[in-house]
Amino acid sequence: MHPFLLAILSLVLFTQCNSKQVSEQSTPTLYQEPHRNQFHFSPDSMWMNDPNGMVYYEGEYHLFYQYYPDSTVWGPMHWGHAVSKDLVHWEHLPIALYPDELGYIFSGSAVIDWNNTSGFGDGETPPMIAIFTHHNSEGERAGAIDFQYQSIAYSLDKGRSWTKYAGNPVVPNPGIKDFRDPKVVWDENSQQWVMVFAAWDHVKLYGSPNLKDWTHLSDFGREWGSHAGVWECPDFFPIALEGTDDQRWLMIVSVQAGSPNGGTGAQYFVGDFNGQEFVLSDDFVAAVRPAEVLNEQRINRDEKTVWVDHGRDNYAGVTWSDVPASDGRRLFIGWMSNWQYALQVPTERWRSAMTLPRELSLIRTSAGPRLAAQPVRELQMLRQEELFWSPEETGGLLSGTAVNQQEWILEFDPLAQPTISEVYLELSNSAGERLLIGYEVESQRFFTDRTITQLADFQAGFATQRHYAPRAPDQAAKIRMHLFLDHASVELFADEGQTVLTDIYFAKSPFTTARLFADGGVWQTNPQVFPLASIWR
Ligand code: FRU
């Protein structure tokens, strides 16, 4: 079912069921509620989806987000707002953008207009410009198809207050039902602003000298990658192949269905941009072979796709604009949920969290250029004193610590331990719930397994099988798994971020025991384990 229809249905169910639940329970302390992640961003209350408008300006990383302040399910969208000085600790700010006569405020991006090309500046302060989709729900209800269009707003006080442009929309709708999620980047080569947004089964590229007047440049993607669902939330930016001056353009596109382990997910494309068109690189084309087209019906069976993340729970992710050149990183954050069940997850006061912020890089492999994602180094500031223990002495058991708020670094060498067929880290509690994160030797796949957690019946397919991620090409025998375990999520960065798997989970009670398990032997490893401080206390 389309997420918006699902949202309305759930809203009705929610209001019927939830008024009762709330009155029967005592209110837990803010940010200490069951399932509240302790080192991931989440709104203090109510519904959140996509990250929006991420931009760095004067020492602050801005994070805007799809927000509905009146309910814990999707509804008329606003842009919520938070800032961070370090990408780790977040300060909540008042709502930045409210729905208006042109519609709800859907996803989009923000840039700093350093040269005041828009003319919104006051001569001293470069304007911060938000570029977003207006979603006209009345038009949608009336059966129109042109109810989404791109608009802008500006701020001269570091994103605290916003003025919407009187000439909105800046990109009117030509008659395409899904027409949304603009991401804007300044292209140094062609000296223009470039906007990319999703239009049903492809993305559209537009160019502008001033962020107000836009011209259609080209379309991309009808024939490439996954078309199992509608395209959403693209990102587009230059990035050099690591260690070279071989400059490419990376395009990330979220897709509403068909991700590797089910539901919504994000794919990417590597190519070149000549100021007009995005053309896939020769060494990348084979990875995203054309979807066959037959009578306008795409045959998805043979699609080839490369994914940003193999987990179920990293959607609509995009990168920060205007990170200073002296820093030079390409920083990404995603929405840590999946439209298959986002509206039903069993949290009371709020719904959903963001992934950890990640640093993206483009690396060379024998299969062509590939994306790698690593947790940002700033997260190390959360590390508490390292736990020293010997799995050999304890039979692999680590009990009695807050294992749901830890960072783990584990190694496994299948060549050195050839009798072992799989290894995993198991988190468990006295209720018998277990969460597994590991590696299967023969199939060469990483996996997470949330099927033995008990709060899973809110959606039929939430926890029915392991989630897999194939190992990236060209690896040495020894495997490195870098794990971030929070109260309702696990993020696996394997092989220096070449394989990423992000999943949420819901256990009845916190995990208190960790165990290293190997099938067919004893996992010889020296785990590095760091308890992590909460960012909310
Ligand atoms: C993606 C999305 C976007 C849209 C927003 C609405 O999750 O469907 O395409 O702008 O959410 O909240």
Image (cartoon, grey):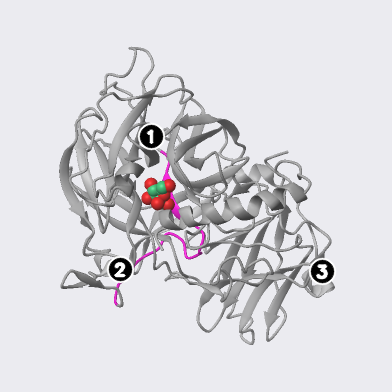
The residue under label 2 is which amino acid type?
Answer: Ala
Would residue 456 be found to the left or right of residue 370 on screen?
A: right
Q: Which residue corresponds to the image point at 23% horizontal and 27% vertical from the top-left?
A: 210
Q: Residue at 65%, 61% (x, y): give it.
A: 409
Is 437 one of the magenta-colored residues?
no
Residue depicted at x 77% and y 50%: 25
Span of residues in magenta: 302-320
Q: CA distance from mark 3 to mark 2?
A: 45 Å
Which image quadrant: the C terminus?
Answer: top right
As helix, strand or loop, the secondary structure at mark 3 comes to loop
Per the model, the C-alpha gap separating discs 2 and 1 is 31 Å
Q: Earlier in the sequence, mark 3 or mark 2?
A: 2
Q: Position of residue 4 (x, y in %)?
A: 42, 53
Which part of the image, by quadrant, shows the N terminus? Answer: bottom left
Indicate which label's residue lies in the foreground, 2 or 1: 1
Q: Between disc 3 and disc 1, whose residue precedes?
A: 1
Can the viewer see residue 276 in this picture?
Answer: no
Residue 446, image x, y percentages: 54, 72
Q: Amino acid at mark 1?
A: Ala
Q: Position of residue 24 (x, y in %)?
A: 76, 50
Q: Check disc 3 and report the residue beneath it.
A: 430
**Residue behind mark 1:** 110
